[in-house]
Image (cartoon, helix red, strand yellow):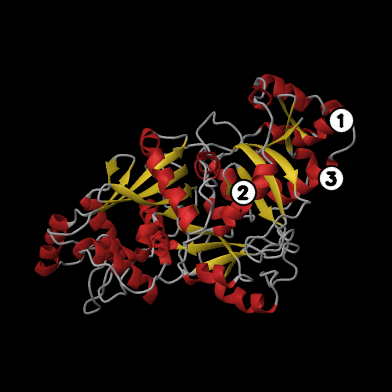
């Protein structure tokens, strides 16, 4: 999927024996996770890692030790293409519409909101600070490929099989997404990516000819013209290029293919507003890593919103939400910017989705755009606008954004919401975005949340896959093929093991490989000093 010549992911594994304070149950040492520092990471590797229960906070990538940690954290994803707005979601969308069009401020008490505090991310700050890498950039730059290939071949005469060596030289093919090969990514009840729907010619008296465009009523045509004229007050911008009214109408029409269907997010978001609308809301997507010019130009304003959010909502002291903390956890990212012909126009990587109300930032959603999903990292907002339920509103906009990206990138169809924590009632709200799935912590297959909830009521740690014979299909099978970066040279672990001086580190490498899986362990470079 990466462009030809793009660099490999480089990670430094830290293990995870120490316990840290848990932000959910407040246990001082109960939060247990494995962690690694990602110096750089391809979007495909990160996609594969989050599909094995990993998650990032800045450049620190961690995986809860599910059967030991005090509050198990299950990866959750929403099937964005099949998403249904609930009554409470519609309430939030209508509240925003009323505010933009009439200036209405709801006097009701703002309920505790989904996505209002991704506290799982704030919690990781602790160990990410302690585990930061201190390796110099020069040590992370591999020497020429020729040298690497010679090293990979040097072991041939010492009984290493030819296949093992050759496997080291085969890079993943550029552009190969292979989504169909992932058994987990197919959505139950949805046609496969390759399936074509063929309409047979109609028989007399058997209804409309489906091979022809449907007839359109004059009323619908008039409605569309009116929509085109009025659709100006809610826009979505990619790095300066606006999503045109025509595109928004297209999204609206796609979202309502049949009449009398329940209203979709798009019906509320891209709705015609009166000429005298009181406010203007614009959502801008800016690349945060590497920082785009728009990101740099709005950095200070964005940071001030974050600072107020942390102080008012999370009760941080005034000196705690520093620029350094903000940059490390919400701006820095190991993900490399990538573009693909069949990918979204904005490309893949890390972004800030900024909500501009009447020319000022009122909220920012930190997101990663990956091959199969939009992954939500964090949300912060101006506390003065708490009455708009920006937590729920931004989550719904991110689901709509996922659907929008899917139009150009057909494989991108999920919205990842981070972790679902059933043992912490405050964190159960993520289960309200349906249909959604939880990741089995043992076999890494997706299971509909409805099947998981009864199990979680009995035990906070659960294996969701009910097939007792099922195993982790992506598990490590050949440790010798793990790729290592040692003394600026890329080599398979089998070669590194013979060269290494000092005590064996096989247990640590084995643990790393079992957690990232065979595919990532053969693609990413594990730094060894």
Going 87% across and 30% down the picture, which residue do you hit? 498
Q: Nearer the viewer, mark 3 or mark 1?
A: 3
| Residue 507 numbered tag | 3
Mark 2 surroundings: few (<14), some (14-19) or many (≥20) residues within 10 A: some
- Residue 200 in view (yes/no): no
| Residue 252 numbered tag | none
Q: Nearer the viewer, residue 170 or 238?
A: 238
Asked if residue 291 is positioned above or below residue 454 in the image, the reply reads above
Element type at marker 3?
helix
Read off the residue under disc 2. Answer: 125
Q: Nearer the viewer, residue 188 or 331?
A: 331
Q: Nearer the viewer, mark 1 or mark 2?
A: 2
| Residue 498 numbered tag | 1
- Residue 326 in view (yes/no): yes
Which corner quadrant of the image does residue 128 belong to? top right
> Of the residues under marks 3 and 2, which one precedes in the sequence?
2
Residue 217 spot, x, y in % from top left: 12, 69
Q: Is residue 494 left or right of residue 322?
A: right
Mark 1 surroundings: few (<14), some (14-19) or many (≥20) residues within 10 A: few
Asked if residue 78 is positioned above or below residue 493 in the image, the reply reads below
Cα distance in 3D space between marks 3 and 2: 27 Å
> Of the residues under marks 3 and 1, which one precedes in the sequence?
1
């Amino acid at each position: 999927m990466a462009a030809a010549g793009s660099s490999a992911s480089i990670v430094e594994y830290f293990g995870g024996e120490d316990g840290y304070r848990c932000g959910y149950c407040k246990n001082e040492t109960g939060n247990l996770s494995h962690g690694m520092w990602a110096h750089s990471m391809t979007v495909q590797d990160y996609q594969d890692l989050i599909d094995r229960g990993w998650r990032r906070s800045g450049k620190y990538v961690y995986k809860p030790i599910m059967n030991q940690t005090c509050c198990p954290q299950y990866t959750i994803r929403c099937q964005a293409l099949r998403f249904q707005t609930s009554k409470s979601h519609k309430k939030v969308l209508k509240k925003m519409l009323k505010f933009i069009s009439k200036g209405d401020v709801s006097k009701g008490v703002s309920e505790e909101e989904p996505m209002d505090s991704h506290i799982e991310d704030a919690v990781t700050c602790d160990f990410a600070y302690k585990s930061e890498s201190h390796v110099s950039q020069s040590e992370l730059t591999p020497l020429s490929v020729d040298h690497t290939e010679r090293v990979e071949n040097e072991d041939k005469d010492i009984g290493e099989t030819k296949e093992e060596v050759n496997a080291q030289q085969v890079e993943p093919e550029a552009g190969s997404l292979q989504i169909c090969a992932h058994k987990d990514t197919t959505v139950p009840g949805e046609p496969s990516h390759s399936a074509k729907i063929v309409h047979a010619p109609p028989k007399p008296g058997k209804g409309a000819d489906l091979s022809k465009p449907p007839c359109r009523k004059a009323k619908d045509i008039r409605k569309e013209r009116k929509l085109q004229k009025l659709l100006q007050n809610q826009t979505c911008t990619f790095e300066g290029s606006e999503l045109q009214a025509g595109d928004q109408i297209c999204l609206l029409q796609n979202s309502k293919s049949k009449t009398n269907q329940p209203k979709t997010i798009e019906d509320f978001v891209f709705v015609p507003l009166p000429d005298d609308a009181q406010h203007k809301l614009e959502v801008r997507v800016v690349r945060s890593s590497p920082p785009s010019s728009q990101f740099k130009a709005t950095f200070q304003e964005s940071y001030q919103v974050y600072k107020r959010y942390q102080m008012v909502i999370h009760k941080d002291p005034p000196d705690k939400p520093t620029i350094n903390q903000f940059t490390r956890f919400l701006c820095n990212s190991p993900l490399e910017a990538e573009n693909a012909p069949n990918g979204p126009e904005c490309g893949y990587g890390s972004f800030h989705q900024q909500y501009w109300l009447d020319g000022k930032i009122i909220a920012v959603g930190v997101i990663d755009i990956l091959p199969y999903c939009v992954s939500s990292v964090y949300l912060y907002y101006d506390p003065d606008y708490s009455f708009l339920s920006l937590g729920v509103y931004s989550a719904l906009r991110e689901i709509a954004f996922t659907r929008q990206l899917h139009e150009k990138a057909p494989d991108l169809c999920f919205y990842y919401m981070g972790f679902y924590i059933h043992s912490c009632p405050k964190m159960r709200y993520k289960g309200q975005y349906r249909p959604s799935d939880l990741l089995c912590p043992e076999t890494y297959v997706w299971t509909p949340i409805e099947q998981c909830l009864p199990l979680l009521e009995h035990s906070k740690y659960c294996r969701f896959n009910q097939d007792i014979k099922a195993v982790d299909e992506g598990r490590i099978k050949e440790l010798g093929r793990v790729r290592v970066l040692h003394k600026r040279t890329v080599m398979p672990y089998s070669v590194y093991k013979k060269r290494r001086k000092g005590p064996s580190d096989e247990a640590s490498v084995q643990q790393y490989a079992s957690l990232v899986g065979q595919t990532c362990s053969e693609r990413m470079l594990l730094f060894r000093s």
